[in-house]
Amino acid sequence: MVTKPPSGSIPTAPGSYQFKDANGRVIYVGKAKNLRSRVANYFQDPRKLHPRTASMVEAAATVEWIQVRTEIESLILEHTLIRQHRPRFNVRLRDDKSYPFLAVTVGEEWPCAVLVRGVRRKGTRYFGPYPHSRSIRDTLELLLRTFPVRTCSTGKFNQHAKLGRPCLLFHIEKCCGPCVKEVDAATYATYVDGLCRFLNGDNESIVGQLENEMQEASTAMDYERAAVARDRLIGLQRASERQQMVAERDEDFDIIGLADDELEAAVQVFFVRHGRVVGRKGFVLDKVEDLTENGLVDRILESMYGEDTPMGIPKTILVPIEPNDVQTYVGWLSEKRGSNVQIKVPQRGDKRELHELVTKNATEEFLRLRMRRAADYNSRSRALTEIQDILQLPEAPLRIECYDMAHLQGTDYVGSMVVFEDGLPAKREYRRFIIKTVEGNNDYAAMEEVLTRRLSAYVEDRDMPIGERREKSSKFAYPPQLLLVDGGKGQLAVAQRVVAALGLQDEIPVASLAKRFEEVFIPGQQTPVFCPRGSEALFMLQRIRDEAHRFANTFHGELRGKRMVSSSLDGIVGLGEVRAKRLVKAMGGVNAVKAATLADLETLTWLPHAVAEAIYAKFHPPQETNT
């Protein structure tokens, strides 16, 4: 574990710091306005640190720093070091697909328009990214009628230049034939410029230019040239319909939406130029470091704009929440752009609605990511095999049961049991337990009661004669091939004790998953087993644990709500359970019912007058008067 350097040796200036492991590998890179103050934060009581931060400090052997002059320089340095070293405890961008761009090779003598992916080259302008290559091809197909630039490879261009004969695209008027000098360089340059302007969202000026050209040709009775201009205009208008109009025509901005949990974040970005959506991109971030939502926006901005972006940096960037030090990021992006950049959170109007749309896209992509992993048979099979290897199980756990407790200061204590079969939730097998023997706040005792009740029922059913077992089928007839409890070593010890007491230690393997550090514990091992982050095994264990937590909390909420209603409204003549629930919902809560006047209660047309009087009398007893 890294030791704290002497405070006096750390400068108070801005800069970047790097934690390194025993082999000298950089495992974390950060930035700070004040290096001394920021680095000191890592050397407090580990229990007060975020679990991921504590794990990083535990894995580090040394810490170093580089001092710079300004906060913007520290931001640039941090991004450079992260890109260079790819530290394991920094957020990682995981782009699961290569987005297509429409590239125009403006650096060539006769530029061409092509669909590209991957590496970007100098002398080429990129437009997009687009969600599908089909959308680029369809758009380009329409635009070639208006801007007949070449789309062929350099080899094919040279081949037809030698032959002195153009290809088919020239004859169907989707290329102006630069290979055989059917067009002069100046005219070809206007086609390329018009194509680039359109792809950048500048539609109106091009439309106006073509309309003027068509009008002039018509006035001059050059109807053939007017028809060509008309056809180009129609093609342009059809292509424009593919670009969604979302803002004023003079507005350029990028809008970012995100959806996340404790481990991952899905990000969607819409690129708006001249009021039109001209491209979009989505990617996933692995949250392997301690990040607030503001810090997550920091990393998104660094990932998007740290490199040269095809669409450039717009005047405005709309984000779900401001970055930690918004002025530093404004200064950095303004410097890269060469003019002022604003970072804003949309509050109202069209931009707020558009941001909600982008966020909805991010949420849906996040759910699709989770569903792909959950529904994919190969992923589930791989997860179960990995769990078998990691937990040293005799066979793949085709039936996993997970248990969790829920209560509020020791009241309404409940337990939950969720079951996953073949990696999928078997909701018909879920069970809920009301804790009967535990008083106060004691999760260990509650867990012991739940496990004892469940496993005792299994043993009783197993030991019954076959004939009786058929007549009396138990809801706990099947044993788990892995019994998972939500918690750390304490909960694991409870599970071990119950399993051993019932003689099931050789039949039912147990494990625990601690939410705080996402650590997996098994019997006979003091330290957690190694379960790689991002692995299918960890994903499945977390999903099962989270489902048990959700199921327990839902039951606890139902029980507590029911108790609160019944305890306060119990004993009122004419007020049964169904009518009481309807009353609480209509009045807005139990306290509102208690405070309601008789007139308030009588406004509820479905509530009999006698019942309304009984309710009012319950909470407003007549005052005794002294005579």
Image (cartoon, rainbow, N blue to C red):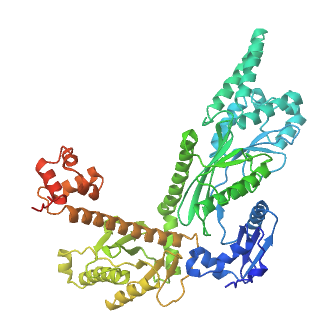
Q: Residue at x 30, y 79 (%)?
A: 454
> Seen in the image, is 589 located left or right of residue 43?
left
| Relative image position of residue 414 (x, y in whole percent) | 31, 73
Q: Residue at x 52, y 78 (%)?
A: 519
Note whether residue 508 is visible: yes
User: Is the N terminus in the top left, top right, bottom left or bottom right quadrant?
Assistant: bottom right
Q: Residue at x 22, y 74 (%)?
A: 473
In the rendered view, would you say 609 is above or below 420? above
| Relative image position of residue 251 (x, y in whole percent) | 67, 37
| Relative image position of residue 232 (x, y in whole percent) | 72, 24
In the rendered view, would you say 591 is above or below 150? below
Note whether residue 95 is visible: no
- 78 or 616: nearer the eye? 616
User: Is the C terminus in the top left, top right, bottom left or bottom right quadrant?
Assistant: bottom left
Q: Residue at x 49, y 67 (%)?
A: 380
- 574 or 178: nearer the eye? 574
User: Given the current orientation, which residue lies at the most extreme front position?
Assistant: 627
Say which quarter of the image contains residue 322.
bottom right
| Relative image position of residue 14 (x, y in whole percent) | 77, 67
Say which quarter of the image contains residue 180.
top right
- 173 or 374: nearer the eye? 374
> Seen in the image, is 524 located left or right of residue 534?
left
- 360 or 469: nearer the eye? 360
Say which quarter of the image contains residue 176.
top right
